[in-house]
Image (cartoon, helix red, strand yellow):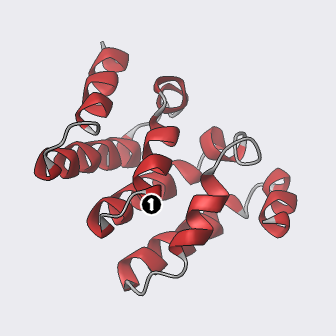
Protein backbone atom coordinates (compact mmCIF):
# COMPACT_ATOMS: atom_id res chain seq x y z
CA UNK A 1 0.00 0.00 0.00
CA UNK A 2 2.79 2.43 0.89
CA UNK A 3 4.71 1.64 -2.27
CA UNK A 4 1.63 2.24 -4.43
CA UNK A 5 0.93 5.55 -2.67
CA UNK A 6 4.54 6.70 -3.13
CA UNK A 7 4.46 5.80 -6.81
CA UNK A 8 1.23 7.79 -7.22
CA UNK A 9 2.75 10.83 -5.54
CA UNK A 10 5.87 10.53 -7.69
CA UNK A 11 3.57 10.45 -10.72
CA UNK A 12 2.21 13.85 -9.69
CA UNK A 13 5.72 15.28 -10.11
CA UNK A 14 5.40 14.72 -13.85
CA UNK A 15 2.24 16.80 -14.27
CA UNK A 16 2.30 20.23 -15.90
CA UNK A 17 0.66 22.07 -13.00
CA UNK A 18 3.45 23.61 -10.94
CA UNK A 19 1.40 23.92 -7.76
CA UNK A 20 0.55 20.20 -7.85
CA UNK A 21 4.19 19.34 -8.45
CA UNK A 22 5.29 21.46 -5.48
CA UNK A 23 2.71 19.85 -3.20
CA UNK A 24 3.73 16.36 -4.32
CA UNK A 25 7.40 17.15 -3.74
CA UNK A 26 6.58 18.55 -0.29
CA UNK A 27 4.69 15.38 0.62
CA UNK A 28 7.67 13.25 -0.39
CA UNK A 29 10.01 15.52 1.56
CA UNK A 30 7.89 15.24 4.68
CA UNK A 31 7.54 11.47 4.35
CA UNK A 32 11.28 11.07 3.84
CA UNK A 33 11.87 13.02 7.05
CA UNK A 34 9.66 10.78 9.13
CA UNK A 35 10.01 7.34 7.56
CA UNK A 36 12.04 4.67 9.29
CA UNK A 37 12.05 2.30 6.30
CA UNK A 38 14.00 4.33 3.77
CA UNK A 39 14.74 1.44 1.43
CA UNK A 40 11.22 1.79 0.02
CA UNK A 41 12.14 5.27 -1.23
CA UNK A 42 15.02 3.80 -3.19
CA UNK A 43 12.80 1.03 -4.52
CA UNK A 44 10.13 3.39 -5.89
CA UNK A 45 12.64 5.74 -7.52
CA UNK A 46 12.32 8.79 -5.31
CA UNK A 47 16.03 9.57 -5.55
CA UNK A 48 16.03 9.80 -9.33
CA UNK A 49 12.81 11.84 -9.19
CA UNK A 50 14.40 14.32 -6.79
CA UNK A 51 17.52 14.54 -8.96
CA UNK A 52 15.27 15.34 -11.94
CA UNK A 53 13.73 18.18 -9.94
CA UNK A 54 17.22 19.45 -9.04
CA UNK A 55 18.08 19.46 -12.74
CA UNK A 56 14.96 21.49 -13.52
CA UNK A 57 14.62 25.26 -13.45
CA UNK A 58 12.08 25.90 -10.67
CA UNK A 59 13.98 27.10 -7.60
CA UNK A 60 11.25 26.14 -5.12
CA UNK A 61 11.11 22.59 -6.45
CA UNK A 62 14.90 22.40 -6.33
CA UNK A 63 14.93 23.37 -2.65
CA UNK A 64 12.22 20.86 -1.76
CA UNK A 65 14.05 18.13 -3.69
CA UNK A 66 17.34 18.93 -1.97
CA UNK A 67 15.60 18.82 1.39
CA UNK A 68 14.19 15.39 0.58
CA UNK A 69 17.63 14.12 -0.42
CA UNK A 70 19.09 15.63 2.76
CA UNK A 71 16.59 13.69 4.85
CA UNK A 72 17.44 10.47 3.03
CA UNK A 73 21.19 11.17 3.17
CA UNK A 74 21.19 10.42 6.89
CA UNK A 75 20.62 6.78 5.99
CA UNK A 76 22.34 4.25 3.80
CA UNK A 77 19.67 4.91 1.18
CA UNK A 78 21.79 7.58 -0.50
CA UNK A 79 25.21 6.46 0.70
CA UNK A 80 24.92 3.13 -1.10
CA UNK A 81 23.96 4.80 -4.38
CA UNK A 82 26.05 7.94 -4.36
CA UNK A 83 28.65 6.75 -6.85
CA UNK A 84 26.14 5.18 -9.24
CA UNK A 85 23.78 8.10 -9.57
CA UNK A 86 23.57 11.69 -10.71
CA UNK A 87 23.13 12.92 -7.15
CA UNK A 88 26.55 14.54 -6.70
CA UNK A 89 26.52 16.26 -10.09
CA UNK A 90 23.06 17.72 -9.42
CA UNK A 91 24.05 18.83 -5.92
CA UNK A 92 27.22 20.50 -7.18
CA UNK A 93 25.24 22.41 -9.84
CA UNK A 94 22.96 23.71 -7.08
CA UNK A 95 25.94 25.04 -5.11
CA UNK A 96 25.95 28.08 -7.35
CA UNK A 97 22.40 29.12 -6.52
CA UNK A 98 22.39 32.16 -4.29
CA UNK A 99 19.48 30.95 -2.20
CA UNK A 100 20.33 30.50 1.48
CA UNK A 101 17.75 27.73 1.94
CA UNK A 102 19.44 25.71 -0.79
CA UNK A 103 22.88 26.24 0.71
CA UNK A 104 21.63 25.03 4.11
CA UNK A 105 20.10 21.91 2.55
CA UNK A 106 23.33 21.17 0.66
CA UNK A 107 25.42 21.64 3.81
CA UNK A 108 23.14 19.22 5.66
CA UNK A 109 23.35 16.66 2.87
CA UNK A 110 27.16 16.84 2.78
CA UNK A 111 27.33 16.58 6.57
CA UNK A 112 25.14 13.48 6.52
CA UNK A 113 26.92 11.66 3.72
CA UNK A 114 30.34 12.48 5.15
CA UNK A 115 29.42 10.14 8.02
CA UNK A 116 29.73 7.23 5.58
CA UNK A 117 33.30 6.32 4.79
CA UNK A 118 32.33 4.86 1.41
CA UNK A 119 31.11 8.31 0.33
CA UNK A 120 34.39 10.12 0.94
CA UNK A 121 36.04 9.08 -2.30
CA UNK A 122 32.95 9.94 -4.37
CA UNK A 123 32.70 13.37 -2.72
CA UNK A 124 36.36 14.15 -3.40
CA UNK A 125 36.20 12.86 -6.99
CA UNK A 126 33.31 15.16 -7.87
- Relative placement, left or right, of 120 versus 104 is right
- Relative placement, left or right, of 53 versus 73 is left
Q: Residue 17: x, y in percent?
A: 13, 45
Q: Which residue in the protein does label 1 denote?
A: 66
- Relative placement, left or right, of 120 versus 5 is right
Q: Residue 38: x, y in percent?
A: 51, 34
Crowdedness of circle 1 by 10 Å Cα count: few (<14), some, many (20+)? many
Q: Which residue is drawn at 77% across and 47% down?
A: 83
- Relative placement, left or right, of 24 versus 115 is left
Q: Residue 44: x, y in percent?
A: 46, 24
- SS at circle 1: helix
Instruction: Name the residue nearer the viewer: 51 or 112.
Output: 51
Q: Residue at x 40, y 44 (%)?
A: 32
Give the position of the N terminus as an image quadrant.
top left
Count of residue discs: 1
Is residue 100 positioned above or below 65 on the image?
Answer: below
Is residue 109 positioned above or below 6 on the image?
Answer: below
Give the position of the C terminus as an image quadrant.
bottom right
Instruction: Name the residue nearer the viewer: 20 or 104.
Output: 20
Q: Residue 77: x, y in percent?
A: 61, 39
Q: Which residue is drawn at 36% across and 66% down?
A: 63
Q: In which quarter of the image is residue 80?
A: top right
Is residue 95 positioned above or below 39 on the image?
Answer: below
Q: Quadrant of residue 78?
A: top right
Q: Residue at x 47, y 57 (%)?
A: 55
User: In the current view of this chain or complex, which residue is farthest to the top?
Assistant: 1
Amino acid sequence: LIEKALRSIIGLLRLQDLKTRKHAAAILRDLSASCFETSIFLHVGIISSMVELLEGSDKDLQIIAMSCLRHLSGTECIAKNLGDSRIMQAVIRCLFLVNEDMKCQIAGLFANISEYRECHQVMIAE
